[in-house]
Amino acid sequence: MASTAMAPEPSPNGASFTSSVPWWYVFFFFSGFPALLYQIVWQRALFTLYGVNSESVTMVVTAFMLGLGLGSLIGGWISRYQRLPLLGIFGVVELLIASYGIFSLRIFHWAANFTAGSAPLKTGLVAFTLVVIPTVLMGSTLPILVSHTIRLSRNVGTSVGGLYAANTLGSAAGCFCAGMFLMGWLGQSKTVFLAATLNAIVGVTVLVWHLATREGQFAAEEKSVSLPKPSATQDAKDEVNSGFGISFPVALIAAAVAGFIALGYEIVWYRLFSFTTAGLAKSFAFLLGAYLAGIGFGSLLSNSLCKRFTNSQTLIRLLVASVFLANLLGFMVGPILFYLVVHVSYLWTLVPIGIAAGGLGAVFPLLCHTSMPPDERAGSRVSYIYLSNIVGATLGSYLTGFVLMDILPLRVLSVMLALMGIGLGVALMLKAQLDRPRFVAAAVGAAAATLFVVLASPALFHVMYEKLLMKEKYVPGAEFRAVVETRSGVIAVTQMGTVFGGGIYDGKFNVSLVKDTNGIQRAFALSYYCSNPKEVLMIGLSSGSWAQVIANNPQVEHLNIVEINPGYLPLIERAPEVASLLRNPKVHIDIDDGRRWLVRNARRKFDAIVMNTSYHWRSNASNILSTDFLQLIRQHLNPGGVHFYNTTESDEVLATGVKAFPYGMRLANFVVVSDSPLQLDPQRWLDVLKQYKIDGAPVFDLAQEQHRRRVGEVIGMINTLDRTVPGEFFTLESAPHIRTRTANVRIITDDNMGTEWLQ
């Protein structure tokens, strides 16, 4: 049965509702802008406080989505009361969001201190609550404004599509601005302050406008809702199958499945983007911006379609076409990226991502329009579909990112999502009342799409990580020796034994100091600057080469390793140079985020804490480079203890280290810092090197001339202190010299995040 769109009612200022964009659409755009600024900053802040492992990521995303869903229910409940001033309520909600936002980072830090060392359950519940509270407020705004708009337009699709588009495009703009300049220029606290200010401006302006025009607006709304209310019997009938083409229960299920697929694709795309950019912080903001922009424009398209077509069956057919095309293109985003990065910038892939997201973005408004009448309960019904969509999205995020990525290769996961999308399209196609020829054509198209996805995927996804890593340098036939995919990231090993973690160099399988191909001399130097390193903590495992060297140091009694990605363990087990590390009784390995492990093990203290830190510009790198983190490190050092970590040749990292600690020294591209004067002893170091054995074999055989010469080269590093030695990597620089040279260099904090957002 077809539905008929009702004629537009006049707006409060007397103009036709469709003649211009209602002003609250504009404010809803500016409401969406700070929402994504909050998400980016809060997510980043919570990762700093609670760790960046997969559990933390899942908790934050789930809390955001659940808060939006609960908020939509509350907003839908509020919208059912016809006499309530909905615009005024929207303004108040914006002010409440601003109030929370302005104090949010302080609240997060207070909560972190409150839960420091607590059980994971307590910590998780507190962090979960911190995110749910403001997102409930955010989620309530859509059904409130939808209900207000439907009172005037009498068209569900245009109301939902227009508002959803405005808010989502505002969020997309927020993502792009955050990635391009806001996070880098303002840091976390000032970005949140900007977001809260925008919320406050929107809230105050809406309230002032509402109070100034409420009489005319109330009269217009009274006129717009003067149509007869459906009876209770009719209302119940409408909810089951109103004749709007799709029954309400079916719409709820379809919204959930669409949400699952959409978030599943987003996580798959982010995994690919993250590997391509080697974990560049901006990549997430750009991907999310393109994704939201696509959803926004898809909602605008549905808005236009609902104005143009009055027949619900026509709209259902368009909905089916949108689902099919969006899912096929979503599946092809990966292969398109694999092709593009070999020839042009990966940023071109944002275009197909936006188009695919656009098709997915059209689903929600079209489902709303074809499953409910534009009566006084429309806002409430929209909130149910919105909640269903968010529940599906939450499950998609959780199952894809937390469960499936640990057991399925990315290719298989992409195929699964595509087949789910095709299945959703087929289910909706059965509601489209197609004649026989069109039904047969659609069925054949769905079968062909299924065969294409299943049969073509091996070729389309072949050597994908090789192309993403090598880009324009990729040569056909080049393949990795091993690839490990886990929910914590992707690890690839070349034929020559070089390890790439998350798309960037992460070490080599080598423990030979005579044939040093990976700067392993730095690991052997522990006894030069640390007099008695009995208890050692190592944050980061990678190839295990550094851990193997330090575990076999004759002075070391216990080595505790914290590694976030368990995917390194099977690679180490298969590498003969380091395989014995996993059987060494002196070694204990914890799979966790390093910063979170330190917080949870507040009483553990060490003589040395070693970190072969990844590049300073990578996403979340400043979590373990900031002054805030160094204060945490200080609490875990024994008297005379040292912290030794990679600066990746960043003067900011160097300056921060010698700012936080009174004593220190640069050793090659590492810095060693301490609260006590460094006990530099070349003779002690030489004695330890002579005793060194790995897997029973001496590191140096002093009977060989090459080995004796190499010992001299290694020990000769001590003669380079504060000297410029052209072409020499292994040089030393004292803390006073570093402070003078880096006097004008910015110090890294949790708030400014170093260079993460400046690359």
Image: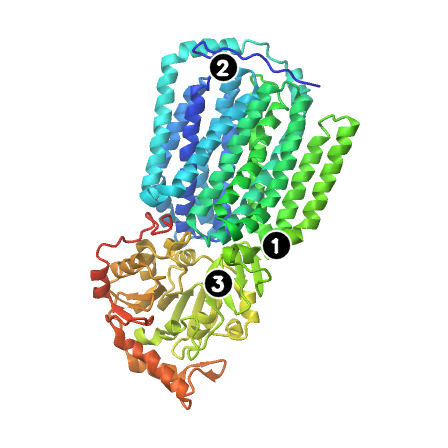
Quick check: 722 above or below 441? below
CA distance for labels 1 and 2: 50 Å
Q: Closer to the camera, 368 or 300?
A: 300
Instruction: Please say whether residue 392 is visible from this viewpoint.
Output: no
Callout 2: helix, strand or loop?
A: loop
Name the residue beneath numbered marker 3: 590
Left or right? Give the position of 652 relative to 116: left
Callout 1: helix, strand or loop?
A: loop
Judged from this view, the residue extending furthest toward the bottom is 703
Q: Looking at the picture, how far across and down is residue 694, in whole percent?
A: 47, 79
CA distance for labels 1 and 3: 24 Å
Q: Looking at the picture, how far across and down is residue 212, in whole percent?
A: 36, 13
Residue type at numbered disc 1: Pro
Callout 3: helix, strand or loop?
A: strand
Q: Which mark is residue 17?
A: 2
Quick check: 646 above or below 21? below
Left or right? Give the position of 690 relative to 303: left
Q: Which mark is residue 409?
A: 1
Say few, some or many: other residues with alpha carbon within 10 Å of mark 1 (under 14 / 14 to 19 / 20 or more). few
Q: Closer to the camera, 371 or 316?
A: 316
Instruction: Please say whether residue 35 is visible from this viewpoint.
Output: yes
Q: Looking at the picture, how far across and down is residue 211, in whole percent?
A: 37, 15
Residue type at numbered disc 2: Phe
- Which is nearer the N-term, disc 2 or disc 3? 2
